[in-house]
Amino acid sequence: MAGNQQPRIVSLHRSLTELVALFSLSDLLVGEGGAGCKGGGFGGDTTKKSKLPFLTEPFEGTRRKTLAQLLCNQQVDLRALTELSPSIVCTITPSQVDLGGASSSLINEVVINIEELRAQLRGACENDGLKLLAYDPRRFEQILEMIGDFGRGLGVAAAGRDRAQRLKAQALDWGQNFYDRMKNKRVVVLSSIDPLLSAGNWVPDLIKLACAQPMEVNPGQDDREITWNELEAFRPDVIVVAPRGASLKESVALLPVLEKVPAFERMPATKRGEVIFASGDALYAPGYGLVNGISMLFSSIAGLESGYITERDSFYRLRYVELHRHKLFGKT
């Protein structure tokens, strides 16, 4: 890296923290933040507890106005951040920040331009040379671009290109290998049950990479609220129940709720047992960790068992949950 001093990096998003680790730059991290990060270590390895200062907490407001609220999707402790004297701050911004490019907000009202945000951060840290690496990927290709750009921004361009290429190559390889098992299947990923939401952003892109048909025809948009009648009319061959932020156990626990919905019982996916319960984690992480979400999604569409291209017991099919109802729910 350029300069006489090693950079001091603060990462305000878990996916970027994981990329820093994959780029072998963890020793340069001086602080972290973002949902799911605290105490979690790098790369999803929960056995390695992070000792870095944790700088964010959930944002409870309805409208973001201040620097602390606009730097990432959580609220940043600016005092703690400035005390770390970072030279690089990396983040995935909320949609209210206009990045001025293809990854800018598509729907929500823009309240600040990235250059204004950058200037405010430099002023708060009293460092005119501070670098802010900010992203807002909404499509799969934008995630690949982000990984490459992030590597360049950290001075390890080759590592960024390598990770982006590997992620894309793995997705294309699985798509080719399981093409006959996935082609033309109608697929919906439910990111919430109440309200009922169909997953958007890059999820439809991934379904198309599987040569299947997503319910959402406008990738890059936020998750969309749908009705059970609309879902039934789509006649999904595969339903993936993966609520955002939910563990596998919490996802599985939704089956009794679904069984009370008459439309759910009538769908082709339900009748064939092609309802998959999964953690709402890796599929929505805009980084290299998305490879775990892709492996789960492609396994679900192709009818593969967990443990084939995913970790064993990383997801459950409807038949398994029904057969193990007593163990999973503690009742018959």
Image: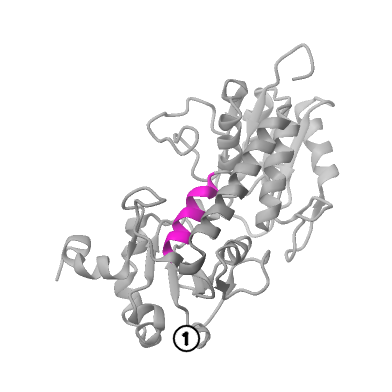
Position of the C terminus, as image quadrant, is: bottom left
User: 59 left or right of 293?
Assistant: right
Q: Residue at x 73, y 66 (%)?
A: 107
Q: Would you place residue 141 above or below residue 229 in this image? A: above
In terms of image quadrants, where is residue 83?
top right
Residue range in magenta is 289-300
Image coordinates of residue 73 in percent, x first then y, are 62, 49
Image coordinates of residue 63 in percent, x first then y, are 68, 58
Image coordinates of residue 251 in percent, x first then y, are 37, 62
Q: Residue at x 71, y 40 (%)?
A: 148
Q: Could you tell me if residue 71 is visible in this image?
A: no
- Magenta portion: prevailing SS class: helix
Amino acid type at mark 1: Glu
User: 63 left or right of 212?
Assistant: right
| Residue placed under numbered mark 1 in the picture | 232
Q: Is residue 290 magenta?
A: yes
